[in-house]
Image (spheres, rainbow, N blue to C red):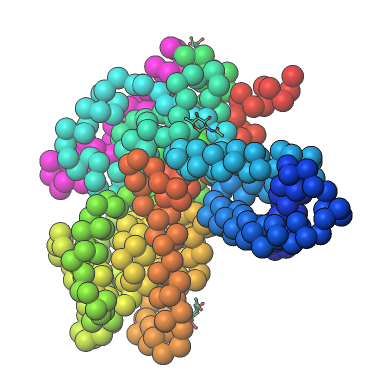
Amino acid sequence: MLEQQMKRPQINKKRGFYVKMKLLHKHGRPQEKSSCCFLRYYKWLLWLSLTLYFFTSYLITNNNNNNDKLTSLSKTHAFSSSKSTVVASRALIELTLNDSLKPRVNKIGLLRDLKIYVYDLPPNFNADWLANERCSNHLFASEVAIHKALLTSEVRTFDPYEADFFFVPVYVSCNFSTVNGFPAIGHARSLLSSAVNLISSEYPFWNLSRGSDHVFVASHDFGACFHTMENVAITDGIPSFLKNSIILQTFGVTNRHPCQDVENMVIPPYVSPESVRKTLEKAPANGRRDIFAFFRGKMEVHPKNVSGRFYSKKVRTAILRKYGGDRRFYLQRHRFSGYQSEIVRSVFCLCPLGWAPWSPRLVESVVLGCVPVIIADNIRLPFAEAVRWPEISLTVAERDVGMLGIILEHVAATNLSAIQRNLMDPTVRRALLFNTPIEQGDATWQVLSTLATKLGRSHRRSAVSAQ
Ligand SMILES: *[C@@H]1O[C@H](CO)[C@@H](O)[C@H](O)[C@H]1NC(C)=O
Ligand SMILES: *[C@@H]1O[C@H](CO)[C@@H](O)[C@H](O)[C@H]1NC(C)=O
Ligand SMILES: *[C@@H]1O[C@H](CO)[C@@H](O)[C@H](O)[C@H]1NC(C)=O
Ligand SMILES: *[C@@H]1O[C@H](CO)[C@@H](O)[C@H](O)[C@H]1NC(C)=O
Ligand SMILES: *[C@@H]1O[C@H](CO)[C@@H](O)[C@H](O)[C@H]1NC(C)=O
């Protein structure tokens, strides 16, 4: 960056100089012969150079993405023959304008030449499930959102032979239980297995790489283990047919865990960008946050021992017992569809573990400007390179949950406004939401940019480089 800033004035000065020379030549009056004529031209030459200078700096500052191109072009022409300079500037302008009209997503940095083939599977693997509207909206819906975003993305290729990665769109989280409304994922393994059977028999690509350049979404509690209970998830493990592939999963811990014993990427849980937009529209105009600490969700007073494990490792119970009667804490145990309007009114939003460490509250808090208080030991958070979690959240150890009051008061009295300011950074919010179509910097974009760093994993690339 600094280098570019230092180079810029030099280049532009040169351009001004060459324009001057060219104009003088046109009128056939070499400078040294008649200094009077030079003086006559001088004023408007100066004006021309200045205009050109400001115009090119405008182009440069307003086209960050074309910076490299501009700099190299300017360089080439500044050092080449003087005649081409004015023409070159015109071409440069057109090039810049043409480029700026094109969609950006595939033009930026690492995504430049990434190519993804999206399998066109029969509708029983995906589209049929959309008959239930909840399928594309609930917290596991990233499996739908990423698929939709890829279909219209510039990285999509229709030629599987030029693909770096293969996306296998199977929606396993949309079989909602008629009893409790939760997604029943009991059929996930068999549905995925038949998808893999299908693609490996009808296309050559799975067998070529043993699935290692194939990408799946596993957006539930324990990711690719496909079970809501950790002990069963661990016992069942990751289905053997997925073990070579790349799994996008909401589950992530910093320690070793059988459910992430596969090449994986932590993605945020799905929160509908539309619901966030509506909540922000209705939020109090003065941005006032009258709730100090907020939590709404399952909080058991007497958690049951389910095969040796307690819901939320009893953390939520501890919060309820200690702060249930505390006026600073707004704790609610019932479901309420308008809970986002409560988040937008809150300073701190508690994000304790449930059965799994992650929760959609993490995303909702950040995008609605409430400081997330993460209470889930060893959690691995999504897109750590793009989202500077330590600067926008608080982490409280599970065993320290009894000190929440003191900790939050301390932060409120010291660095709360710094954290809130970091939370206002739009790039952070954008990175946690899945949009259709894809938007630069959004959650699907983050997935793609991480995939782009794994191009070595691509069968096609390694085959090419081995030749
Ligand atoms: C810009 O686009 C127009 C129309 O698409 C084309 O005619 C023109 O040659 C392009 N200019 C450059 C510099 O590529
Ligand atoms: C949906 O879940 C129910 C209950 O777990 C199961 O019986 C049914 O087979 C599942 N549906 C499909 C299409 O797999
Ligand atoms: C891939 O391998 C499987 C198992 O070895 C085989 O049944 C299948 O026919 C192969 N697929 C292709 C397209 O050759
Ligand atoms: C939970 O129940 C299991 C039996 O299901 C028992 O072995 C274990 O000791 C219990 N754990 C606790 C902490 O009560
Ligand atoms: C704010 O203060 C808390 C407690 O002292 C500390 O843990 C946290 O890292 C600080 N956060 C920022 C962004 O300064």
Q: Quadrant of the N terminus?
A: bottom right
Q: How many marks?
A: 0
**Residue 17, quarter of picture:** bottom right
**Does the magenta portion include 107?**
no
**Which residues are the magenta region?**
173-202
Residue toward you, 62 or 462: 62
- Residue at image coords 70%, 60%: 40
Q: Eyeballing the image, is 185 above or below 389?
A: above
On the image, the x and y values in percent for residue 405 come to 35, 85
**Residue 81, quarter of picture:** top right
**Does the magenta portion include 183?**
yes
Residue toward you, 383 or 91: 91
Residue 69, visible in the rendered structure: no
Residue toward you, 183 or 430: 430
Horizontal side of 40 relative to 327 (left or right) equals: right
On the image, the x and y values in percent for residue 446 come to 48, 48
Horizontal side of 62 relative to 460 (left or right) equals: left
**Residue 277, quarter of picture:** bottom left
Horizontal side of 162 relative to 189 (left or right) equals: right
Q: Residue furthest right?
A: 32
- Residue at image coords 73%, 52%: 20
- Residue at image coords 24%, 46%: 137
On the image, the x and y values in percent for residue 402 come to 36, 81
On the image, the x and y values in percent for residue 164 come to 56, 28
Q: Residue furthest bottom?
A: 413
